[in-house]
Amino acid sequence: MKILITGGAGFMGSNAVKYFLKNYPDIQIVNLDKLTYAGNLENLKEVENDFRYKFIKGDIADEKLVDEVVKDIDVIINYAAETHVDRSILDPKAFITTDVLGTYALLEAARKYNIKKYIQISTDEVFGSINNGKFTEESPFEPNSPYAASKAGGDHLCRSYFKTYGIPVIVTHSCNFFGPYQYPEKLIPLFITNLLENKKVPVYGDGQQVREWIFTEDHCRAIDAILQKGEIGEVYNIGTGNEIPNIEITKILLKKIGKDESSIDHVKDRPGHDRRYAIDSTKLRKLGWQPEVNFEQGIKQTVDWYEQNEQWWKRIKSGEYLEYYKKQYQV
Ligand code: NAD
Ligand code: TYD
């Protein structure tokens, strides 16, 4: 089986490339990634010489290139996206281009070349905020940030390509990811690396916003289960039940890294900040999946990784990494 993983140089995409190569000896993987600020070929060092793996630098919104790449592909898993809510508030255009038009280009190629399965990696953020209960796969989309709105646009296109053209699409909505290799702009890696650098951590508003968290490997296993057993045209929520307010996560990290609450900087809230995300993943669990890493274990592994891989995140935070890997990888 030949899988196209888009955005395979990003956080979850690179974890997925490594997961599939490790678990499927006969697999071939093509990684199409534009290498935006969030793409980092260092994430893929351990597989870069694997004969089953090929990297192509390019944009999923480039229809001509995508057509060329998808020609001999069996399965597409679309991880590529602009993903950071704060950046989407400052500059939404790249989000619309990649998350909507990029998805369109991939779906068109999937249609032309009779792809066997197309999996869209999406987010619970498309549903908006929920005070009580959980979102199900049938909940209406009520996106509140330009990021969530662009992801919702891509997801709607996926649904329409299944309904209209019979393209074998499956859409997934996951809760928040965490784990090694996450770009240090998102809550957990930003806070860990700030604390390791003896800097303060910026908690937005009252810090009582709740997110549900999934560790990298559990997300990879969920996508694997969906690839093997998921039903075409269906939507699957990926959730763990690990719901934690931001301020609690902050305190866990302070304790782990040996800091006190004087390292917290209470800053202005994010505009349109969703209060709580929570999703019902009963449907996915019926495929035999369940999370295997609890939050405590995952956060320990994550903090340990950032402690042991200082060079990786220091290069990113100093801005040197783009130049570094351009030189290193000639891309
Ligand atoms: P990331 O920001 O770490 O990486 C995104 C990758 O996509 C990068 O390698 C980047 O270079 C690449 N990319 C961006 N635009 C591209 C384009 N036009 N063409 C080709 N490649 C492009 O992302 P992540 O946090 O690993 O998220 C992966 C996917 O999972 C995204 O689709 C995101 O919406 C979804 N998701 C993320 C979370 C989360 O908590 N991070 C939760 C649920 C769903
Ligand atoms: P983030 O990691 O950006 O993911 P998302 O917005 O997609 O859920 O943020 C997670 C939560 O942490 C969210 O409620 C915003 C909050 N947050 C902070 O309080 N401070 C920060 O510096 C960041 C990046 C996030």
Image (spheres, rainbow, N blue to C red):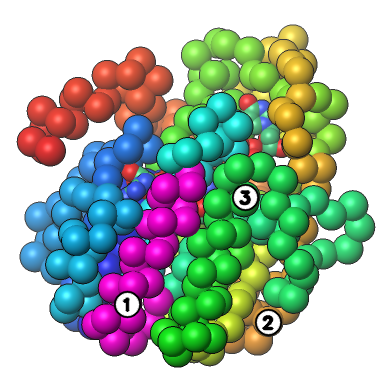
- The residue positioned 60% from the left and 77% from the top of the image is 235
Give the magenta range: 95-118
For marks 1 and 3, the one nearer the N-term is 1
Residue 180 image point, x, y percent: 44, 43
Give the residue at mark 2: 283
Residue 37 image point, x, y percent: 35, 33
Tell me the mark number nearer the camera, choosing from 1 and 2.
1
Give the residue at mark 1: 110
Residue found at the far right of this picture: 132
How many residues crowd around disc 1 within 10 Å: few (fewer than 14), some, or many (20 or more)?
Answer: many
Circle 3 — which element?
A: helix
Residue 205 image point, x, y percent: 80, 24
Q: Is residue 97 magenta?
A: yes
Circle 1 — which element?
A: helix
Residue 3 in which image quadrant: bottom left
- The residue positioned 16% from the left and 54% from the top of the image is 56
Marks 2 and 3 close (CB-CB < 8 Å): no
- The residue positioned 91% from the left and 57% from the top of the image is 132
Q: Nearer the viewer, residue 43 or 291?
A: 43
The amino acid type found where label 1 is placed reads Ala
Give the residue at mark 3: 148
